[in-house]
Image (cartoon, helix red, strand yellow):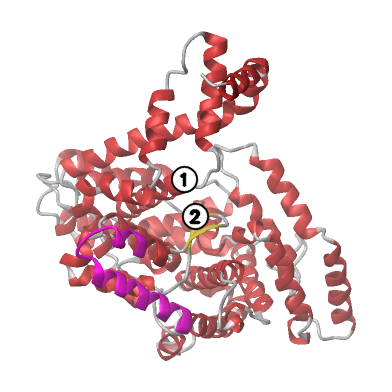
């Protein structure tokens, strides 16, 4: 052993207690990664063995959960590969542990092997997911028509009168419904991430199936980078090209990736700018009408969540690209002087949902009890096959819905449909495997109705979490300099002064980024909120807002206090 190695060991021996104290959390986080990896691999193998069927339009929760899982798994190992000196720190911890306990830490051999295996994470992940290619490809292909229908230009939205409740006056009171309710407000950004990362894992599908190739190319043209985790991004064109370069028979896919990157660079900025322009007008019209006629929040609630989701996607795209795309021939693509207006309109929709929560609850209590329950009972009765266990579960759905009444809202009773939604998730799993008596894909009407019912129940007990899903703006939490820069750009445009209050309002979203399993982040998040909301620049904002009010140009709609008419949700 060289003198340098002996010196390092002596240093570790001397400071072993401090090393163990400071690196224990770091080390055991990697142990958690091993455990997570083993559990995921076991689950994925079980799903393959059961010959599970996945379709976002049928078993929505199951398919979404699966795609979220494989993307989270992939993102995790890409993040691990970005940690500097991970091997050195893990080795140092194990050395200190061995000096203190006389033997290596039990998980160290597995950890060491994992560090070696994932030195080149993308290549290793594609090898690891080889047995799961068919199920991944099937799940992704179920997004084909949904993604193409959602990924449209602003002119197409305008022609379709998207989000307009007054385009057909006689239909104003008709409920906005769809056979795929939850898909209508599913984030386009999330679908884009599923498709890009999913087809990296099952890349042979791109050579074998033209539908897979078309869907992949459509997603690859949307952005120049996608979110990996918070402010960490991945430049997916580069990653795809590096992977395909290492394999034979993928020269056409490399050319496709380069073509998509050029398309995203040359046209993507203009497409997203036009979408933001459309959404500013459409969301403003929607919020104005709903503020005047809050009774429309019941039948048109789907439009609200679509508006929030579409807007959040565009906000997220702009934030991500403005921060990460520094070398560009069209820098104007990543600047929006009217950005504050879109943020404000999103906050206005959120405010309306909170203010008229009881209006929404009254509508959906009646809808669930008098329509959904009756239709579900008829649908169950018409099933050609319905085993006893599934029949008991679905009968309990009918009973739960039929027992609802308007007095529960008036008495401020707390609704809780988590059990119903979990049972439906289980039922999706039971009925989406081979050799099951009740096959869900052969009973699409039942699937569509239950997915609609799940959405309706969330209007009663889960409105806040649905707002987090569709309108959460926590990305700003991790881009503080960009947040300030966008605010200052707004101050330079007098038409945006009435909307600048949206920036401090957005700070209230930041608490959503804290996970229950990471409570230690709570303090850091609180500091970020305070830094963003009580920054010296906010003094300038306060002055501008005050001046705007004095001059009569202000257009603020104050948040309701308990004494405001309608603050209790009554119309």
Horizontal side of 416 relative to 215 (left or right) equals right
Q: Quadrant of the C terminus?
A: bottom right
The picture places residue 506, in percent across and down from the top left corner, at 68, 63
Residue 397 seen in the figure: no
Residue displayed at 36% across by 71% down: 219
The picture places residue 61, in percent across and down from the top left corner, at 34, 52
Horizontal side of 557 relative to 367 (left or right) equals right
Asked where in the image residue 507 lies, by quadrant, the reply is bottom right
Q: Which residues are magenta?
A: 241-267
- In the rendered image, residue 356 lying in the magenta stretch gets the answer no
Q: Which residue is tagged 1?
A: 81
The picture places residue 203, in percent across and down from the top left corner, at 25, 60
Residue displayed at 59% across by 50% down: 513
Mark sitting earlier along the chain (2/1): 1
Asked where in the image residue 517 lies, by quadrant, the reply is top right
Residue displayed at 36% across by 61% down: 242
Residue displayed at 46% across by 16% down: 104
Mark linked to residue 460:
2
Looking at the rendered structure, the secondary structure element under dot 2 is helix
């Amino acid at each position: 052993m060289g003198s340098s190695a002996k010196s390092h060991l002596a240093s570790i021996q001397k400071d072993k207690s401090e090393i163990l104290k400071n690196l224990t959390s770091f080390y055991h986080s990697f142990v958690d990664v091993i455990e997570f990896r083993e559990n995921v691999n076991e689950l994925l193998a079980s799903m393959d063995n059961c010959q599970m069927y996945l379709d976002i339009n049928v078993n929505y929760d199951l398919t979404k959960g699966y795609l979220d899982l494989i993307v989270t798994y992939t993102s995790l190992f890409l993040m691990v590969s970005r940690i500097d000196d991970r091997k050195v720190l893990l080795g140092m911890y194990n050395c200190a542990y061995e000096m203190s306990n006389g033997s290596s830490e039990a998980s160290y051999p597995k950890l060491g092997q994992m560090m070696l295996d994932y030195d080149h994470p993308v290549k290793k992940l594609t090898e690891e997911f080889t047995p799961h290619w068919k199920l991944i490809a099937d799940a992704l292909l179920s997004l084909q028509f949904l993604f193409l229908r959602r990924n449209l230009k602003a002119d197409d939205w305008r022609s379709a009168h998207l989000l307009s409740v007054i385009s057909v006056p006689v239909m104003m009171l008709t409920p906005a419904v769809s056979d795929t309710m939850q898909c209508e407000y599913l984030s386009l950004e999330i679908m884009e991430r599923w498709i890009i990362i999913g087809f990296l894992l099952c890349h042979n599908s791109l050579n074998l199936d033209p539908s897979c190739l078309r869907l992949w190319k459509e997603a690859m043209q949307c952005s120049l980078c996608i979110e990996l985790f918070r402010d960490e991004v991945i430049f997916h064109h580069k990653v795809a090209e590096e992977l395909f370069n290492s394999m034979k028979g993928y020269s056409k896919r490399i050319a496709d990736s380069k073509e998509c990157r050029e398309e995203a660079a040359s046209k993507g900025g203009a497409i997203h700018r036009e979408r933001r322009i459309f959404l500013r007008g459409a969301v403003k019209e929607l919020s104005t009408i709903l503020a005047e006629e809050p009774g429309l929040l019941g039948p048109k609630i789907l439009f609200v969540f679509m508006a929030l989701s579409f807007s959040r996607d565009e906000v997220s795209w702009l934030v991500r690209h403005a921060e990460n795309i520094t070398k560009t021939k069209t820098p104007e693509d990543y600047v929006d002087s009217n950005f504050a207006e879109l943020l404000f309109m999103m906050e206005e929709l959120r405010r309306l949902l909170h203010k008229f929560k009881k209006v929404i609850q009254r509508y959906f209590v009646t809808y669930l009890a008098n329509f959904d329950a009756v239709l579900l009972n008829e649908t169950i009765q018409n099933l050609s096959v319905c085993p006893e266990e599934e029949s008991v579960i679905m009968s309990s759905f009918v009973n739960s819905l039929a027992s609802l009444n308007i007095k529960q809202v008036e008495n401020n009773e707390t609704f809780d449909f988590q059990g119903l939604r979990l049972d439906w998730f289980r039922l999706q799993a039971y009925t989406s495997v081979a050799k099951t008596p009740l096959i869900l894909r052969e009973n699409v009407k039942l699937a569509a109705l239950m997915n609609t019912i799940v959405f309706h129940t969330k209007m009663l007990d889960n409105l806040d979490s649905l707002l987090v899903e569709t309108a959460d703006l926590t990305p700003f939490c991790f881009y503080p300099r960009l947040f300030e820069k966008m605010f200052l750009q707004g101050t330079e445009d007098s038409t945006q002064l009435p909307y600048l209050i949206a920036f401090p309002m957005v700070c209230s979203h930041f608490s959503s980024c804290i996970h229950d399993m990471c409570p230690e982040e709570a303090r850091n998040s609180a500091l970020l909120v305070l830094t963003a909301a009580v920054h010296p620049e906010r003094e300038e904002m306060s002055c501008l807002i005050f001046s705007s009010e004095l001059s009569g140009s202000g257009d603020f709609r104050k948040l309701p206090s308990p004494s405001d008419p309608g603050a209790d949700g009554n119309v």
